[in-house]
Image (cartoon, rainbow, N blue to C red):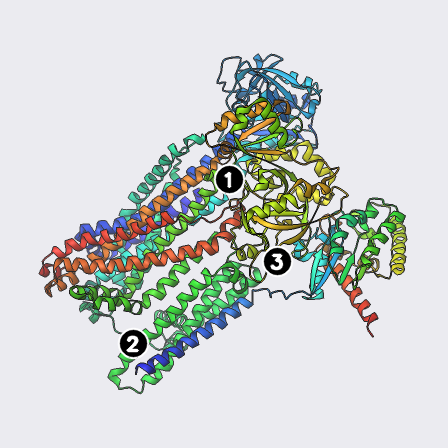
Amino acid sequence: METALARHWARAIGLVVLVGVLSISLSAASLTPRRAQVATLTYVALGASDAFGIGTQDPRTQSWPAVLAQTLGPDYHLINLGVPGATVLVAAHAELPVALAQQPALITVWLAVNDLEANVPLATYIDQLRSLLLALSSLAGARIYVGDLPDLTLLPSFAHADQVALTATITQWNGAIAALCQNLGVTLVDLYAPWSDLRSHPTKIAQDFSADGFHPSAAGAQQLAATFAAAIATSKSSVAP
Amino acid sequence: MTTSLAMLSVTATIVVVIILLVWGIGDAFIVRQSLRNFQRRPLRTMVIIVGLMLTTVLIAAASTVNATLVLAVKTVAIANVGRVDESVLQNGEGLGLFPVQIGTTVMARLAQDPLVAGVAPSLRIDGALVIDTTQRQVRGSVNILGMDPRQAGPLRDFSAQTSAPSTLEQLGAGDAILNASVATALHASVGDHIAIYSSSWAGQALQLRVVAIGGAGPLGQQQTVLTPLSTLQHIAAAPGMINRVYIANVGNPLTGSGESTVIARTIQSVLPPGFQVQLVKADAVNYALSAETLFGRILNLYTLFALAIDVLLIVLIFALLAAERRMDLGTLRAFGFQRGQLVEVMLFEAALYNATAALPGALAGLGLGYLVVTLINPTVAHLGFPLLVRVRPVDFVVTLCLGFLFSLLITALTISATSKLNIAAALHNAPDPPSTAPHFHELWQTAVGRQHEQWQRRLASFVGVLWGGCWRGFIPLAFGLSTMALAARHDQPLASAIGAVVEIGGIVLLLRWLVLWRAARDIQRLREDERLTAIERKRRQIDRVSTMFFGAYLVVYWGMPPMIAHYLAPSRFNGGIEEFFLAGILMVLGIVLAGAMNLSWLLTPLRALGARSGRLRHIMFIGLIYPAYQRLRTGIGLALFALVTFVMVVMASLTNSTSQRYNDISQLTGGYDIIGQSLSQPIGGIDAIQRKLAESDTHTAAAIQNISAAVELPLAIIEPGGNDAGWRLYPVAEVSGDFLKGAGLPLVARAQGYATDAAVWAAVRDHPGDVVIDAGALATDEAATLGIQAPGPPQLEHFAAPPIAATLLGPSSLESAISAPQTQALLRQTSPEVRALLSQPAQLLAYTLRLSNLTDADGKLQPTTVWAEDFRGNAQAARMTIIGIVNNTQGQRYGMLGTVATFAPLERGLTGISNSYYYFQLRPSADVSAIARTLSSDLLEYGFETTVISQALRDLNAPELFATQVLLRLVGLMLFVGTAALMISGLRSVVERRQQIGMLRALGFQRWEIQLVFFVETVLVAFGGTLAGLGMGLLLCHNGFALTFTDATQLGIALIIPWGTIAAILLIAIAAAAVAVAIPAYQASRVPPAAAMRYE
């Protein structure tokens, strides 16, 4: 009788514990973020305030390099070197040494808007960008992606600028950036064309930019990340056999 | 808001009283029976009334203390800002000068305004350096104020402490009045000569003679020198210009700001564009009240816990009353009374108890609140804190009515639950037989199926269906799951946690029902007379298992460490005080539920021990059998003990932690006594100070044991290997002197490869690039892995000054530090985005460094690479290695710390953002104040300002020190009331068992044996309850404190458990229960057996 009772108890407790554990796990799983896998590849983002995440609610997760890293998957560990207000010159002393000390598999560089705003002469800018890219190219096995100037005439903060002159300047700068990229063998990420599409969707501009009319919002950061992701995917497939 | 609450509570109380009166008039028997019961046993009635009084006592005391605290905080805020209610100033940078005509216009507009008591066009120069050349003392960040006194009213009142001239009109061109704050700091006297330096008259000194020392003055506690307006305009090269128009409202300083908005509107109507009206006093009061968040949270928690104890005590009182009256009620039922009528009788009686208890309870609460505040008075006298007990009639009425209604509601619920009885069993005082409730599908048919059913039966059946659905787990399961889904969608962590608990409860109930259903099928095979016993036995077994599982789940879910909860229950705590309260209550409920239902198992070892206790065997047997048999009553008793102990442990720990945060001066100062900074010219480092003192003042030099120095640097840091690898902000300081030997910077972790703290400091000293960082920089998981108690993230002031010195920057000093020319210059050098970040301190948290991945697989700290950069310059980012973690439990030492050699490459060619601070640790026998004065005098040529750290901290933290004293007294009050609750519980448990005592006496038990039986029972319940409460309290504090108090308040509060106090609390709780039982047991055992058996 005692043995039968003990067996019965053991069964009952076992059943209750099993269901309880399953239930806790299920309820926890509905709210728990997945634990990050150990990353094996390093992705370094050189950039300015947009890379830093200014304009988004949560820069740690909503900046465009963070979104791109999420798109690339858990194999990539992001080192976001974006510095608010950075020009290529600032990046050369604040970001480049850190980048060179890592062994990145992937590097994105988007440093142009602050130089243009600061009236850095195009020749100086290109020289400085060349030095930066040459230093980065010395890293073995790193794929480098360089963003150019988007269509700034769409930004509310540039609304009062001379639109024709600005368009001409952007075209000139982008031509120089494209030539440099071709020259150095790094991949150019064309940001001008995708942004120009916004011209036909004016309501999206309000969505994609933060209240300052300059920095991308979380939605804008996703757009940027998607453009870089597409370029990365295209260049991968083009070198694949 | 309070008035409408008062109206509502008074109306509700009147309605309830009218219903009860109508009820009584309609049925005279109810009144007669209730009054008879009320008068029958005066001692019992008194005990019940005292128990119910405790409900209102705690609420009224907390309300009084809270109102007093709020009043005191407001008074301090007003004392800090002075008599000024509104201030007119021009938008923009610099001095913000504007023509005096603007002031004249405002004066003219407000001349006849009945709300305005005074207007004073003024010129105010902030951040001046004042040197008292007579006393050879220096003070920085002083306001120099010149006012037009013609229509100044109370603004001109300087409450002069010294001889005339004390009015502004009498001041000569070279005269000055010092307010009390600056006079104390300079040790100034009337007749002293002072020299004032400011960037507004660079290269000159304003030489003045002190003609009077005033009280607070128009700018309150801010360090202020008053001088004629024309003198100030002349030296600042601003003839005919002012930069403020100050307005004082009518009424006293506390009430005046109530009309600020109206007055501001009036002023704004005559101002040209570009001017603004600041509501100085209203803003200061609001800021001060919002800064009291921590104490507000603890007071809220206190009130919630007090209510929980009250609920349990009321339930216990009336459950025991119902148990005591069981035979009476059974007899009435036998005479044909309905259950509803029994409830009416008991409820009417309970209303009499409640009504009698409400007023004395509220008065006693007010009295205790008054006592608490009065007792604090001598303790906080040295803080100069204004202490006025505030009792508003409207608060009193609300407390009174809510106390009555709350008690009555709980009473009604308890009576309703306990009045269900089996008549035959009640008449024989035997246990109720198993319930024979109608089958679920029969109830369902009655509720919805049959066509011609009475609506009352339909309703009753519907309630039965719902009840059955609850007991079978369907409804809790569905409710829990849907709550969780909704909570996840709307990001409501508290609702999600409640949903999870209800869901698991539903699963347990469902399983219980399934097992019972299966068992019932097996039992059908037994003989008919065996079935009832068999199913009851089965039900008990299953109940034990299910309550044990559910109780364990509650304890584990709410008590699991944050590291595990991060993955299993991420939404468990979100920093809300409600979650902390809920966690505590559910943990206590869990352990009591599991313990009370399984008491017969848990007592097995004690029973075995009792069986070997020789002559006392029968006593042990009786003493142990009753608690296990009466599970409900034992459970409520256990719950009360557990809850009181739990609340005491939690409140004592919270109070101790906050108290240590502000009272432990030696921890906050890091062992240093004086902080100094040169305000006029660089002093040249520690060596220069030592040289100077060795030459001119060997006495002072001999009194100094350690000297250190630190300067704050504006660097950004990145940890490439971390989970959050981006440039982040964190305080960084260049340290030298004895800091580099660890003096004042104790380490809590060393990197692998460094055997001692000395080895770490040697590496920091000798190897540029090696640094240490405080524990506040660690991510929560990382700190937990290293077993380090980390404070909350750094605040704005920690970026403005180096460790320890930053804690001396109050809001006003911080404001002046931010508006200082060097800070403004720094801001101009940064990019617009960074400037925007720095101008919004709330944003800091989003960009604050959080180090991770510092440890290896064994949880040991590894040397960790970070990079640092000053974005103002062009130097290359520098690689650094963190090799040690500095203890920062109380938030006094934020920063990444390294040597000059480490940071010099980054700072080359850049201007500093803070002065160099010098830290002096004196030998134990030295007179700290005297040495501080001497140091300032010896180093006068450098404008060396010295501050006695302990005194500055006491002044700065006066409201917090006051609040911790309040909390300490409140914990004492709660101990008192909690002990009273336990004593009442003990008293009632004996009184209701006089018949049983008679029975035992009739069986031959001696008096001492009966007393011993009660003692065994009481100690068992008291010990079990206190142990459970202690365990749960410590568990919750350990795992929930950081999120609820440290992170949520951002005040660097760390948990410090007061073991001695807790041990005393436990002893008092058990002793109180033992005493409470001993007296009535002694009396009861003296009653002749026959009399006791007749007891009713």
Residues packed near mark 3 inside 10 Å, few (<14), some (14 to 19) or many (20 plus): some
* SS at mark 2 in the image: helix
* Up/down of B796 relative to B1072, above or below: above
Q: Residue at x 48, y 18 (%)?
A: B161
**Quarter of image, res B989:** bottom left
User: Residue shown at 39%/40% (left/top)?
Assistant: B64
Relative image position of residue B288 (x, y in whole percent)? 52, 38
Residue B949 in the image: x percent, y percent? 52, 33
x then y, percent, for residue B487:
54, 62
Numbered circle sitting on residue B668? 1
**First of labels 3, 1 by sequence position:** 1
Badge 2 density bin: few <14, some 14–19, many ≥20, Cα 10 Å = some
Look at label 1 and name its amino acid: Leu
Lower sequence index among marks 3 and 2: 2
Circles 1 and 2 on the same chain: yes
**Marking on residue B853:** 3
Of marks 1 and 2, which one's residue comes earlier in the chain? 2
Foreground pick, B835 / B42: B835
In this picture, residue B626 sits left or right of residue B588: left
